[in-house]
Image: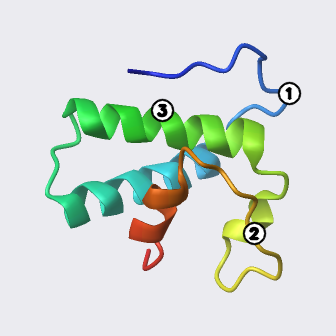
Amino acid sequence: MLHRNEFPSTVPLKSDDLELLQRFLEAWCEENHVDMNNEAAVNVASALIDWYQFELSDRNMLKPQPSKILPDSPRLQLLLQQLKEV
């Protein structure tokens, strides 16, 4: 089931944001042998976008060797563990 945040993001996604999220999704799909059109991949993509827009306070933390610890997101905790080698 897709989750939609009831509050719109104040920060629009740019092309580089979408490219980054696409790489995360592709890595997850490859690691889990899931087709990008699979419902599981759609749910992961939705969760990634929601997390990126509404829960991540500093997008620079996604660069290699972040200086700060990422905020907890119960919904994405397992996904982030699977994607730690992206």
- Circle 2 — which element? helix
The CA distance from mark 1 to mark 2 is 19 Å
Three-letter residue code for mark 2: Met
Q: Earlier in the sequence, mark 2 or mark 3?
A: 3
Disc sitting over residue 10 in the figure: 1
Disc sitting over residue 61 in the figure: 2
Three-letter residue code for mark 3: Ser
- Circle 1 — which element? loop
Image location (x, y in percent) of residue 3 = 52, 22
Q: Residue 5 appears in which quarter of the rendering?
A: top right
Image location (x, y in percent) of residue 58 = 83, 58
Please give left or right for residue 52 compared with residue 27 in the image. Answer: right
Image location (x, y in percent) of residue 82 = 39, 67
Q: Residue 41 appears in which quarter of the rendering?
A: top left
Tell me the quadrant of the picture where the C terminus can be found: bottom left
Please give left or right for residue 9 compared with residue 65 in the image. Answer: right
